[in-house]
Amino acid sequence: MERKLLQGDKVLWGLLALLALFSFFPIFSASSNLSYVIGTGSPWQYLLKHTFILITGFLLILSVHKVPFHYFKGISILLLPVVILMLFYTISQGKMIDGVNASRWIKIPLIGISFQTSSLASLIMMIYIAYYLDKIKEKKNEFKKTLFPLWVPVFLVFTLVFPTNLSTALIFLFTVFLILIYGCYPLKYLLNIFLVGFLLLTTFIFLAIQYPEKAPDRLDTWINRVENYFNPTLSKDGNYQVQRAKIAIATGGITGLGVGKSVMKNFLPQSSSDFIYAIIVEEFGLLGGIMVILIYLLILFRITVILHHASSVYAKLLIIAAGLPIIIQAFINIGVALNIFPVTGQTLPLLSSGGSAAWVTCIAFGIILSVSEERFSESKVNQNKKVSNPLIIISEE
C-alpha cells in the first residue's frame, strides 16, 4: 500500500505551515535592524538562514512523524544519558563565546549555528517520563522504587539547565509535574517532592544573598528582571525592552503600520526573537496579533483532539510531553511582550529566529503527528501490549 508523504492530522500540518510561511514577514523586517546594528550581513542573509532552519525543521517533522510512536520508548532510553552528558559538556565549556555568555549553547561546526542543549534534553526527558509512567501504570508505586529511574534523571536535567536557563528549567519542571499528575503518579509523593524543592530553592536564595560571588552569573539578571517587572520605575535601562515592546504594540493600532514598516525594531535588540510578537502587532496591528494567538489556540485544540483519540496511555502521555511545553512557551513569549510576565528569553515557536529551538519544536510536532497517524496495524497492537524491553523495538524492521 502506497504511503502518503504527509501523514497524521492534516489540520495540524496546515497550521504549522501557516506559521512557518507567516514568519518570513516579521523575520525579514526585524533582521534589517540586526544587519544595521551588528554591522555584518544583510537582511537577505538572515532570511536565507531562517529559510534553511525552517526547511531542515520540516524535514525533521517529515522524518520523525513516519516513526511509529512506540519506538520513542527505546529511543528515549538511549538518548537520555547522551543529552545529560551534552548538558555537562555545555555548562563546562566556558562562559563566553563571541563575547557573550554562552554556557547554554554549543556551536555546530561548519554551519555556524549555536545549539541549545537544554531544549533537546528537556524533550528527551519528557518522552522518557512518558515511557516510565506507562511502564509502572499497573504496579504499586513506591517512592524508593521510582527514586533512581525517575527522579534522579529529572534532578540532573533540572540542575544542569537551571543555572543558565531559568525559564526553560521552570517550564520543564512544571510540565514534568503535569505529566506525572496525568499519569496517576501518587500525589503524596509529588507533594513531598514539591516541599523538598521549595526548601532547596529557599536555601539557594539564602546562600546566593549571603555569598553573591559564588552565585550563578545570571542570578543578577533574574533578580533585575523580577524587580523591574514589579517596579517598572526602578530602572529605565533594565526595563528598556519591555517599554519599547509596549510602544510597538500601542503604535500598531487595529491594522498595523504595514509589512516592514516597524519603527521599534530599530530600538529592540531582540526584535527577531524574544520580542518578535511586538513587531508583529506593530506591523500587522491588533488583528495580526489576535490571528497569531488564534493559530496557537487552534494548535492546542488539535493537540487535544489527538490526545482524545490516542489509543493508549503511553500515546496520551507522549502527546502531553511533546506538545504542552510548546504551547506554554508560546504564551509566555506573548505574555512577556504584553508585560504580563517578566522577561524570560523564551522565543515564539516557529515564528522567532533561531536554530536549535525551532528544530526541537519540529521534532516535538513530528512526534505528535506520529501519534495522530496510527498507520501500522501491527503498531496498534504493540502500543497497547507491555514491552518488557523497549530497546528491542529499535531494531525492528
Image: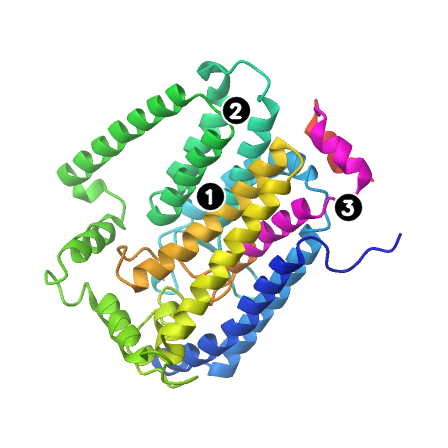
Front residue (pair 209, 251): 251
Camera-near label (2 vs 1) is 2
From the top left corner, tell me how far across and down residue 253 is, in percent. Answer: 31, 79
Which span is picked out in magenta? 361-387
Q: Which mark is residue 375?
A: 3
Q: Element under label 2?
A: helix
C-alpha gap between disc 3 and disc 2 = 32 Å
Q: Amino acid at mark 2?
A: Pro
Q: Amino acid at mark 3?
A: Arg
Residue 244 image point, x, y percent: 25, 73
Does the magenta stretch mainly form a helix, a strand or a loop?
helix
Q: Secondary structure at mark 1?
A: helix
Tag on residue 276? Answer: none
Residue 388 in the image: x percent, y percent?
Answer: 70, 22
Residue 114's place in the image compared with 395, above or below, is below
Furthest residue in direction right, as rendered: 1
- Which residue position is annotated with label 1? 87
Element at label 3:
loop
Which badge, 3 or 1, comes first in the chain's sequence? 1
Residue sitting at x 52%, y 58%: 298
Residue wearing tag 2: 149
Dots 3, 1 in contact, CB < 8 A: no
